[in-house]
Image (spheres, rainbow, N blue to C red):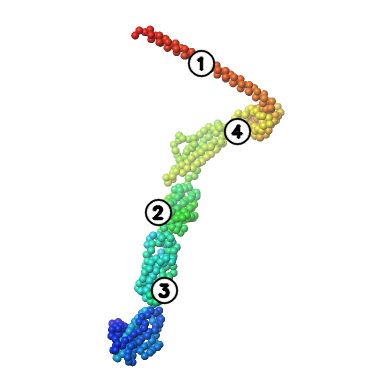
Amino acid sequence: MAPGAAPAARLALLALLGTLLPGPGGARTSVYPSKAIIPRGGSQRVNCSISCDQKATFGLETELTKKEVDRGNNWKVFELSDVQEDISLLCYSNCHSEQTVASVNLTVYWFPEHVELAPLPLWQPVGEELNLSCQVSGGAPRDHLSVVLLRGEEELGRQPLGKGEPAEVRFTVQPRREDHGTSFSCRWELDLRSQGLELFQNTSAPRKLQTYVLPSTDPHLEAPPVVEVGSRWPVKCMLDGLFPASDAEVYLVLGDQKLESNITYSGDSVLAKAWMEENEEGTHSLKCSVSLGEEARWTRGNVTIYSFPVPTLTLSPPEVSEWTTVTVECVTRDGALVKLNGVSAEPPGPRAQMKLNVSADDHGNNFSCSAALEIAGQVVHKNQTRELHVLYGPRLDQRDCLGNWTWQEGSEQTLKCEARGNPIPKLNCSRKGDGASLPIGDLRPVKREVAGTYLCRATSTRGKVTREVVLNVLSGQNILDIVIPVVAVILILGALGTAGYIYNYQRKIQKYELQKARKAQEEAALKLNAQSTPP
């Protein structure tokens, strides 16, 4: 038998005998209270009494610290102190040399020393089961202790506290989107209301849960497949279906260089924009990564950086006199093809050329050259344009300056007369006889005195041309002199037209009647022949 077991066994045996075998004459030992619940370390008074018709000895057998605080002829009150654990005590008595006993059961209660919710994962996927653990140290009696899992103030589950130190109680929950940022905690409850006391409880420090949703789809990456060295070009990366999108992190990386991105959030979507500039030719990897919680999604692509200068377009010589031959040539880098406007017969290649004999009409013409280069399956183009300058003498003809102008006196008019040539010629118009200048290009009222014949001279370093310009000014009388003959002519022409119409109409009637008469004669002849011919 283990040490210390003998006293306990003895007490149990005495208690059993005391309840089954009353003393002589019916003497009995009794105790009050027969059971009690007290806080750990507390004290309890126990009244032991005996029914005996003679003087008897009785007492309280216990290992606890006891003190007799009151007595009578057949009773004693003992005070027990510093009770640390559940215990059974025996009141014993001797009457007529026979011993009887009565037991008292003391239950000790004490609160748990510590309650804690085990750490939560940093991020929890929505919809996946989450195991939560509540740890409780100490506390008794255990059969009155339970553990409650709380979401905020909402009770999610309740379990009795098992054995072990610390005791661990597990719960399983399935977090929702709305649980993001919600606090979870554990609460122990010591319910002693059935023992005449109350409900005691305490709650652990809360832990905040972060839930997230990261779709299984990869981000959508938008970037040009080929770009030119030194150019800036936009890149976009977007992903929908995130929660909470504002906590998502987006990275855009070109090669081994992280790009500075502008990130915007809208609902459950995230969009990252960046500008990229690369000065090294070649194919570079481009990666977009979106991470949320403990997961990440990414998309990769390639960007080819190329160098392709504009083609070289030359006019030789760039400025020529008319009726001179000009050579137009376009050259580009190896591997590219050029096309020179006006040249279609030559096979495609990095060089194209043509020759032409220029005239004044070719002045100001633009010659363009287009170069094409295939890079990573994409065709890029570069263009160059040059303007031809043809030197030619002054031109002053009908399209440049009308030879006859008729204006109404008092009206506002502008004389439009412009000479052509390269270099641009100077133009001067003076009236024959008195040398008066004719204002060109000015809007002004017309006076009778400006009428006359003018000589316009266009001069440049490449020659001189002249042209006569007649300016007529009409007064009120002049208009009648012109209008009356014009009206008369119109009336005469109208009368002639009417007479001609009537004449032609009559001729058509006569022709029709003649044809009709001839047709009747022919029918009569045919009929006569038919009658004279025997059957």
Marks 1 and 3: CB-CB under 8 Å?
Answer: no
Q: Which residue is mark 2?
A: 217
Residue 126 x/y as whole percent? 40, 60
Q: CA distance from mark 2 to mark 4?
A: 69 Å
10 Å crowding of disc 3: few (<14), some (14-19), many (20+): few
Residue 509, numbered circle: 1
| N-terminal-most mark, 4 or 1 | 4
| N-terminal-most mark, 1 or 3 | 3
Q: Amino acid at mark 4?
A: Gly
**Would you identify the image quadrant in which residue 150 lies?**
bottom left
- Give the residue drawn at x 61%, y 31%: 400
Q: Which residue is mark 3?
A: 200
Q: Amino acid at mark 2?
A: Thr
Quick check: can you spot residue 113? no
Q: Secondary structure at mark 1?
A: helix
Q: Nearer the viewer, mark 4 or mark 1?
A: 1
Residue 80 x/y as whole percent? 39, 84
10 Å crowding of disc 1: few (<14), some (14-19), many (20+): few
The image shows residue 459, relative to residue 210, as above or below, that is: above
Number of numbered discs overlaid on the protein picture: 4
Q: CA distance from mark 2 to mark 3?
A: 51 Å
Q: Which residue is mark 4?
A: 421
10 Å crowding of disc 2: few (<14), some (14-19), many (20+): few
Q: Amino acid at mark 3?
A: Phe
Marks 2 and 4: CB-CB under 8 Å?
Answer: no
Front residue of 45/225: it is: 45
Q: Amino acid at mark 1?
A: Ile
Front residue of 276/282: it is: 276
Q: Is residue 27 left or right of residue 204?
A: left
Q: CA distance from mark 1 to mark 2?
A: 93 Å
Q: Secondary structure at mark 2?
A: loop
